[in-house]
Amino acid sequence: MFDQYQRKIEYVRISLTDRCNLRCRYCMPEEGIKKMRHEDILTFDEILRIVRALAVLGVRKVRLTGGEPLVRRNIVELVREIHAVEGIEQIALTTNGVLLDEMAADLVAAGLTGINISLDTLKAATFADITRRPVFARVEAGIEAVHKAGLTDVKFNCVPMQGINEAELPALVEHFTRLRPWKFRFIELMPIGCAYEAGLKGIPMAEVRSRLEQAFGHLRPVQPSKGVYGPAAYYQAEGFRGQIGFIDAMEHKFCASCNRVRLTAEGFLKLCLNAKTGLDLRTLLRSGISDENLRMALQQAIYHKPEEHFFQSSAYKEKDSRAMYQVGG
Ligand code: SAM
Ligand code: SF4
């Protein structure tokens, strides 16, 4: 399925819940968030109907995110059912890793093909400071469980922040990519959620890269495999098995090759990370829409996916005010 700018849309990111077992300072307020009513959240059957319709239209990859997707009950069952949908080739998960120790093996057995773990530090005290929860050891155990489960598509997402984790950026890369073929990605702090209210300051990607080059020498650009699109530019340090990724969200660099749409937990199809435009699928599903009309509605909405996002636009009119825990990153 192509949009009006000839971009091939083959990837959907599904937020399963707004809730989370952490309170990262750039993402959620300390007191948590106003809970959505149970009936306002899409059921697994509703999610599966949407995934089936999207698969017929050409979507090949599903990512489950949140909030924290692993706090949603029976997620292993959902992975199993998505795995059975004809056309879906990849099922990935974005998680904070706290519950992976107990769930990684079951998720992989159910058909999970990739995992992104968000981790900004290797120090338990800094972890507790950033996430407001002292559970670093559980994330460490979760990462080992992923390794044991035999998953090879493993990525880490790290938000570099001035005065918080900036001194350990090389250590993080060293720890996760020297001996294992994993990808360690840096994401620029975005002006959404609580980032600026919390007084946090990000570090530009060019600066992160230059600090890593001071530590590891020249970073060699890695050409993306054919058919792989994404916002990250990957590099490799001499002698390392894994790769380093940079996601420069404040630039529009990846909008021209954007291949994705997002589904919020309440069933709103978001066409761009930071724009309001989209489709209220929950209302359509609950008013008894047929499969054929659902496909047509999806196709029409996706055709009108915005050309680029608005982080740096002065005409902020179409900007969406949702935080990351609501759209899943
Ligand atoms: N709870 C899961 C996790 O943390 O991986 C999935 C959802 S979380 C919203 C997805 C990603 O968004 C995380 O990697 C997190 O670091 C990132 N994120 C949240 N708020 C952000 C912000 N203001 N700027 C940049 N990244 C942010
Ligand atoms: Fe939770 Fe992820 Fe947001 Fe942290 S970034 S509060 S783990 S949703």
Image (cartoon, grey):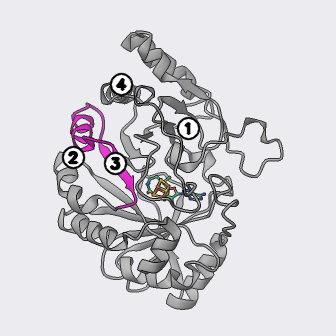
Percent of width and height locating residue 222: 47, 69
Residues at marks 1 and 3 touching, judged by CB atoms closer than 8 Å? no
Q: Name the residue rendered at 31%, 30% in the picture.
A: 44
For badge 4, the amino acid type reads Glu
Closer to viewer: mark 1 or mark 4: 4
Q: Name the residue rendered at 37%, 47% in the picture.
A: 69
Q: Which label was assigned to residue 46?
A: 4
Residue, far front: 31
Per the model, the C-alpha gap separating discs 4 and 2 is: 20 Å
Location of mark 3 (residue) = 71
Per the model, the C-alpha gap separating discs 3 and 2 is: 18 Å
Closer to viewer: mark 4 or mark 3: 3
Residues at marks 4 and 2 touching, judged by CB atoms closer than 8 Å? no
Q: Name the residue rendered at 44%, 38% in the picture.
A: 10
Q: Secondary structure at mark 3?
A: helix
Closer to viewer: mark 4 or mark 2: 4
Residue 15, by quadrant, is top left
Q: Which residues are magenta?
A: 71-97
Determine if the magenta segment contains residue 79. yes
Location of mark 2 (residue) = 111
Location of mark 1 (residue) = 7
Q: Secondary structure at mark 1?
A: loop
Q: Secondary structure at mark 4?
A: helix
Determine if the magenta segment contains residue 188. no
